[in-house]
Image (cartoon, grey):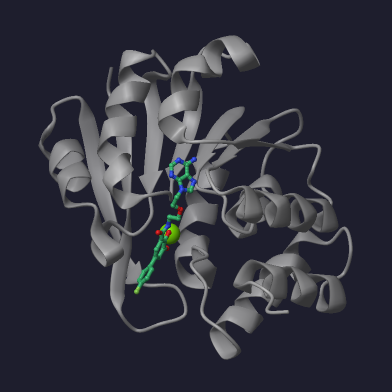
């Protein structure tokens, strides 16, 4: 029977990465996706940019849209201060099932809450469901044409406060042009582009960091 790419990534993690060692899980996935088969993880190069922002912000409450295999959830969770939480949202139940196992293997399950479903359905429920006031940091890595509508939805639902930071992957490849135009053109955001490459390739891509000014 044919396994899926996420299943092959999980198998690689279980056979090569040290259980409970988040760093080795991240490195194992990067090795596999660079040398065996490409996959849409944020990757090592853009991951380093994401790491520096997470370390700078030290978020108490963080949201990730688009979990996939859990690579960035593990990366982020390993950097979170004590009693901080990452809520990560995945639409695809197959991806979510794999991500739960990758997150558990890395030993960061006590910092990560994985929820399944479309972002548009969940965002309006977040405050009540999780008893939170706002997110300190949001990592957008789901459908690229959902970045803008979901950002507007988060604004409307009061999930962003003055100083909340949005970090968006793939703003060049595959691209999120309407999102870029919005955060760069709006007086309510201070935006900065970090030039990089599409994970595991030499194709240009980048991360956009946008501070919500309220
Ligand atoms: N909770 C939710 N609500 C709604 N939708 C949701 C969701 N959770 C997931 N989804 C669905 C979308 O999930 C995956 C999104 N990510 C990408 O598509 C992606 C694609 C490439 C790529 C592919 C091919 C190339 F040739 C070049 C680049 C690279 C990347 O780094 C990407 O991140
Ligand atoms: Mg991405």
- In the depicted view, which residue is nearer to us: 120 or 163? 120
* Residue 6, image x, y percentages: 64, 67
- In the depicted view, which residue is nearer to us: 82 or 199? 199
Image quarter (top left, top right, bottom left or bottom right) of the N terminus: bottom right
- In the depicted view, which residue is nearer to us: 143 or 199? 143
The residue drawn where x is 53% and y is 34% is 63
- 6 up-or-down from 79: above or below: below
Q: Is residue 54 left or right of residue 148?
A: right
* Residue 101, image x, y percentages: 79, 55
* Residue 3, image x, y percentages: 69, 75
Q: Is residue 193 left or right of residue 34?
A: left
Q: Quadrant of ligand 2?
A: bottom left
Residue at the limit of the structure toward the bottom, as seen here: 35
Q: Is residue 153 left or right of residue 136?
A: left
Q: State whether residue 212 appears in this view.
A: no
Residue at the limit of the structure toward the front, as seen here: 1
The residue drawn where x is 67% and y is 31% is 85
Q: Total marks drawn? A: 0
Q: Is residue 37 left or right of residue 49?
A: right
- In the depicted view, which residue is nearer to us: 50 or 148? 148
Quadrant in the picture for residue 152: top left
Q: State whether residue 99 appears in this view.
A: yes
The residue drawn where x is 52% and y is 43% is 91
């Amino acid at each position: 029977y044919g396994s899926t790419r996420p299943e092959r990534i999980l198998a690689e993690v279980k056979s090569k990465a040290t259980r409970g060692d988040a760093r080795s899980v991240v490195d194992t996935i990067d090795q596999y996706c660079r040398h065996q088969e490409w996959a849409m993880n944020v990757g090592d190069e853009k991951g380093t940019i994401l790491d520096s922002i997470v370390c700078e912000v030290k978020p108490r409450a963080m949201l990730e849209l688009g979990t996939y295999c859990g690579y960035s959830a593990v990366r982020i969770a390993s950097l979170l201060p004590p009693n901080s939480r990452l809520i990560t949202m995945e639409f695809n139940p197959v991806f979510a099932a794999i991500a739960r196992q990758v997150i558990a293997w890395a030993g960061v399950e006590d910092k990560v809450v994985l929820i399944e479903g479309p972002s548009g359905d969940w965002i309006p429920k977040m405050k009540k469901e999780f008893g939170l006031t706002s997110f300190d940091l949001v990592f957008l890595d789901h459908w690229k044409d959902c970045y803008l509508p979901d950002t507007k939805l988060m604004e409307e639902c009061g999930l962003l406060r003055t100083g909340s930071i949005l970090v968006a992957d793939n703003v060049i490849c595959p691209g999120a042009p309407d999102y870029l135009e919005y955060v760069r053109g709006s007086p309510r955001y201070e935006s900065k582009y970090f030039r990089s490459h599409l994970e595991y390739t030499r194709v240009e891509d980048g991360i956009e960091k946008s501070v919500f000014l309220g």
